[in-house]
Image (cartoon, helix red, strand yellow):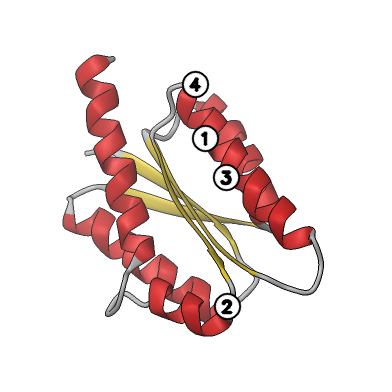
Amino acid sequence: MAKILIVEARFYDHLNDMLLAGARAAIEQAGHAHETITVPGALEVPGAIALAAESGAYDAFVALGVVIRGETYHFEIVAGESARGIMALSMDGLAIGNGILTTENEAQAIVRADPAQLDKGGGAAQAALAMLDLKTRFG
């Protein structure tokens, strides 16, 4: 049984609740244990994963959060840099599923976060588990 850390950037509670429900269900269905920590925003997710990885206590990670386009360039920075940070950690050998949604509006985020619709939280957990399987296979 693997231990998975879910790192969530909680800004939109109702959307994060859906992402978390999907991620937790996917991990539990696969027979693994999980723990959840919350960070201030999507930019902090990669740093939290890096710190947690140093502990050696977790086998894989699920990154969750929602970034909705606003009126400024900040959206592009948050979306791009959080994804870049997660990708860099993945390239360093961490098993990570990226479930940070980047949408134009809340309606798009709801469809993607809802476990009964696109279930991107569950999909991110499944991606983390798939990467963990590859890490085990090639490790």
Amino acid beneath label 4: Asp
Q: Cα distance, mark 2 to mark 1?
A: 25 Å
Q: Earlier in the sequence, mark 2 or mark 4?
A: 2
Q: Nearer the viewer, residue 102 or 62?
A: 102
Q: Residue furthest bottom?
A: 107
Amino acid type for the residue under numbered disc 3: Ala
Type of residue at label 1? Met
At 57% from the left and 45% from the top, the residue drawn is: 83
- For the residues carrying marks 2 and 3, which lies nearer the camera in this image? 3
Residue situated in front as seen by the camera: 59 or 79:
79
- Give the Cα distance between marks 1 and 4: 9 Å
Give whichever of discs 3 and 4 has the lower sequence position.
3
57 sits to left or right of 43:
left
Q: CA distance from mark 1 to mark 3?
A: 6 Å
Q: Amino acid at mark 2?
A: Asp
The correct choice, above or below, for 132 with respect to 73 in the image is: above
Foreground residue, 34 or 91? Answer: 91
Q: Which residue is mark 3?
A: 83
Between the C-alphas of marks 2 and 4, the distance is 31 Å
**Residue 87 picture location, percent across and down:** 52, 35
Rendered image: mark on residue 13: 2
Query: Would residue 39 be found to the left or right of residue 110 on screen?
Result: right
Residue 40 seen anywhere in this rendered image of the structure: no
Residue to which mark 1 is pinned: 87
